[in-house]
C-alpha cells in the first residue's frame, strides 16, 4: 500500500508530537521505517510507525491521529480485545482479523465504530455509507443513510427559523427560576376530580433506575390549570437528578440493546395494554391540566395507545439490510441503537407527545432520560406506575420533571448522553445544538415549529426511526 504525504504542516507537526509523547513521556517503544532523503524532501512525509508497550490510557491510543501510526496492544480474550477497542471517545472505523468467521462477526457487532472490515481494510463503495460513532461524528458519506443529511420531511414547509444575535448570546438561557405558588387547589374543571383525582393528594416523584425517587433539591414545581389554579406539584429536578438518571440509563442500555427485538416488542405491547386499562384516569388528568374536554382528552389517550402498538410492531422490522457493493462478499448494514437519548417533550399533547418520543427510541434498543411537558407533567408521573407493572427493565425509561430549558442545558452538557431530542423554543433549539457540539451529540430539535402529533407522518414518521438508530456497515469478503 502506498502512503502519501500529510496534508499540511500543522497536521504533520501534530502527528510527530503524538509520537514524541509516546516515546519520551509514556515510555512506549517506537519503530519507524527508513525513508530516502529525496522522498522526504518532496513533501510532509512521515514514515510508517509502529508503537508498542503502550498503556490503554496513552494519548496515542485515546486520540485520533490521522497519520501512518499503528499502536499495538496485547489481549487475553475476545472480550478484552473489544474492551480495549472501545476504550476511546472516537469510533470511525476498524478491522477484525481472524480465521473464525463467527468470532469475527460477534466482535464486529460489539466494537463501537461506524465501519468494520473483516479480514480486510479500507474497503469503500458509494452504496455503503462511511462514518463514525461517538466523537468521530454521526454523519455518513454514501449510501441511503448519507442522503438523509440532505433532505427534510415533506411536511416541513418552511426552513429553520432564524434566531437573533441577542438570543444566541443569552447567558441566562437554561438557568433555573424559582417556582411561585398560586391559590390553593379548588374545583377541577371537566369533572377532573371524578376521573383520576382522589381527595388525597398524590406525591408525584421522579422515576430513576426503575424506582420512584424524590428530587435531590427537595424542591417542587407547581402544575396549574389554564385558569391558574394549583392542581398538583411535581419534583423540580436538578443537575444531580439528571446525573442519576443518565447513570441509570447507561447501566441499562447495553443489556436492553442486546435483547431480542421480539422481546422489546412484547414489552411495548404490554405497556399499551396496561395504559388502556387506565384510559379514563389519564383522560381526566389531561382534561384537568389542559382545560380540554374529556372527549378530546380521551382521544389523545386512544392515540397514545395506538402509537405504542405501532412502534411495538416496528421493533423487529428495522434491523438493517444487505448493501450491494463492488465487494465480492457481504456488506451488511446494521441499524444499531444510539445508546442514551435525552428527550425534552413538547408542551402540547402531554401524553401523546411523550409516548411518540419514548416508544420508537425504546423499541430500537435505546435507554432514555425524559423531561416531560413542563406545564402538564402529571401524565408522565402517572405513566411510571404503568411502566412498573409492564416488565420494563430498570433504567430503560427515566423520568425527571422540572424546568425544561434548565434540564436541557444540563443534558446537552453531559458527556454520557449520546443524543438529545428537544421540542421547545427556537432559542432553546439553538442552544441545545450549540452545547451538544462539545462531544458530537446527535440532535433532533424543532426550532419552535410545532408538530401535529396526531398526524401519522409527523407523529410516527420514519425520521424517528432514523434518529433512534445509527448505521454500522460490516464488510465480509468471500473466497478462498
Image (spheres, rainbow, N blue to C red):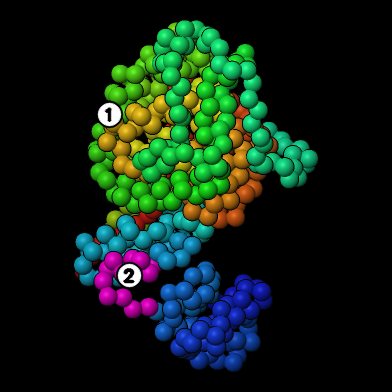
**Residue in front for this viewpoint, 443 or 115:** 443
The correct choice, above or below, for 199 with respect to 446 in the image is: above
Q: Which residues are magenta?
A: 73-85
Label 2: which residue?
81
Residue drawn at the location 60% of the way across and 55% of the way down: 438
Label annotation for residue 282? none
Front tag of 1 and 2: 1
In terms of sequence position, does the residue under pointer 1 or pointer 2 come before the other? 2
The correct choice, above or below, for 298 with respect to 355 in the image is: above
User: Is the Cβ of the residue at disc 1 closer than 8 Å to that at disc 2?
Assistant: no
Check residue 81 for magenta coloring.
Answer: yes
Label annotation for residue 270? 1
**Magenta-drawn stretch, dominant element (helix, strand or loop):** helix
SS of the residue at dot 2? helix
Check residue 206 for magenta coloring.
Answer: no
The answer to whether residue 380 shows anywhere in this view is no
The correct choice, above or below, for 172 with respect to 196 in the image is: below
SS of the residue at dot 1? helix
- The image shows residue 132 at horizontal and vertical percentages of 47, 57
Q: Is residue 158 left or right of residue 351?
A: right
Amino acid at each position: 500500500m502506498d502512503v502519501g504525504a500529510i496534508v499540511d504542516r500543522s497536521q504533520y507537526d501534530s502527528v510527530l508530537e503524538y509520537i514524541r509523547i509516546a516515546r519520551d513521556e509514556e515510555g512506549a517503544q517506537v519503530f519507524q521505517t527508513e525513508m530516502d532523503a529525496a522522498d522526504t524532501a518532496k513533501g510532509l512525509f512521515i514514515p510508517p510507525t509502529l508503537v508498542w508497550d503502550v498503556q490503554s490510557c496513552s494519548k496515542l491510543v485515546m486520540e485520533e491521529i490521522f497519520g501512518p501510526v499503528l499502536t499495538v496492544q496485547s489481549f487475553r480474550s475476545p472480550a478484552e480485545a473489544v474492551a480495549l477497542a472501545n476504550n476511546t471517545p472516537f469510533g470511525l472505523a476498524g478491522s477484525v482479523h481472524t480465521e473464525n468467521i463467527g468470532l469475527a462477526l460477534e466482535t464486529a457487532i460489539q466494537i463501537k465504530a461506524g465501519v468494520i472490515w473483516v479480514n480486510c481494510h479500507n474497503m469503500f463503495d458509494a452504496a455503503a455509507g462511511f462514518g463514525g460513532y461517538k466523537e468521530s461524528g454521526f454523519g455518513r458519506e454514501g449510501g441511503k443513510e448519507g442522503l438523509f443529511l440532505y433532505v427534510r420531511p415533506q411536511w416541513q414547509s418552511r426552513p429553520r427559523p432564524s434566531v437573533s444575535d441577542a438570543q444566541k448570546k443569552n447567558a441566562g438561557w437554561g438557568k433555573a427560576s424559582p417556582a411561585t405558588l398560586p391559590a390553593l387547589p379548588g374545583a377541577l374543571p371537566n369533572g377532573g376530580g371524578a376521573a383520576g383525582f382522589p381527595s388525597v393528594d398524590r406525591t408525584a416523584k421522579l422515576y430513576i433506575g426503575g424506582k420512584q425517587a424524590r428530587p435531590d433539591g427537595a424542591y417542587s414545581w407547581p402544575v396549574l390549570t389554564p385558569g391558574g389554579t394549583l392542581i398538583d406539584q411535581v419534583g423540580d429536578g436538578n443537575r444531580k437528578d439528571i446525573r442519576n438518571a443518565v447513570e441509570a440509563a447507561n447501566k441499562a442500555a447495553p443489556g436492553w440493546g442486546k435483547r431480542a427485538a421480539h422481546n422489546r416488542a412484547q414489552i411495548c405491547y404490554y405497556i399499551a395494554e396496561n395504559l388502556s386499562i387506565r384510559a379514563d384516569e389519564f383522560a381526566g388528568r389531561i382534561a384537568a391540566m389542559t382545560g380540554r374536554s374529556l372527549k378530546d382528552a380521551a382521544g389523545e389517550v386512544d392515540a397514545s395507545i395506538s402509537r405504542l402498538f405501532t412502534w411495538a410492531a416496528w421493533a423487529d422490522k428495522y434491523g438493517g439490510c444487505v448493501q450491494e457493493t463492488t465487494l465480492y462478499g457481504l456488506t451488511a448494514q446494521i441499524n444499531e441503537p444510539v445508546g442514551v437519548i435525552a428527550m425534552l417533550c413538547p408542551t402540547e399533547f402531554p401524553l401523546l407527545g411523550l409516548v411518540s418520543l419514548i416508544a420508537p427510541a425504546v423499541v430500537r434498543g435505546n435507554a432514555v432520560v425524559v423531561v416531560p411537558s413542563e406545564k402538564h407533567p402529571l401524565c408522565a408521573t402517572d405513566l411510571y406506575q404503568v411502566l412498573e407493572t409492564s416488565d420494563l427493565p430498570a433504567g430503560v425509561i427515566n423520568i425527571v420533571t422540572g424546568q425544561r430549558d434548565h434540564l436541557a442545558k444540563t443534558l446537552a452538557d453531559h458527556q454520557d448522553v449520546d443524543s438529545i431530542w428537544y421540542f421547545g423554543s427556537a432559542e432553546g433549539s439553538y442552544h441545545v445544538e450549540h452545547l451538544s457540539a462539545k462531544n458530537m451529540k446527535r440532535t433532533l430539535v424543532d426550532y419552535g415549529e410545532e408538530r401535529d402529533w396526531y398526524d401519522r407522518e409527523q407523529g410516527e414518521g420514519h425520521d424517528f426511526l432514523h434518529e433512534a438508530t445509527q448505521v454500522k456497515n460490516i464488510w465480509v469478503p468471500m473466497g478462498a
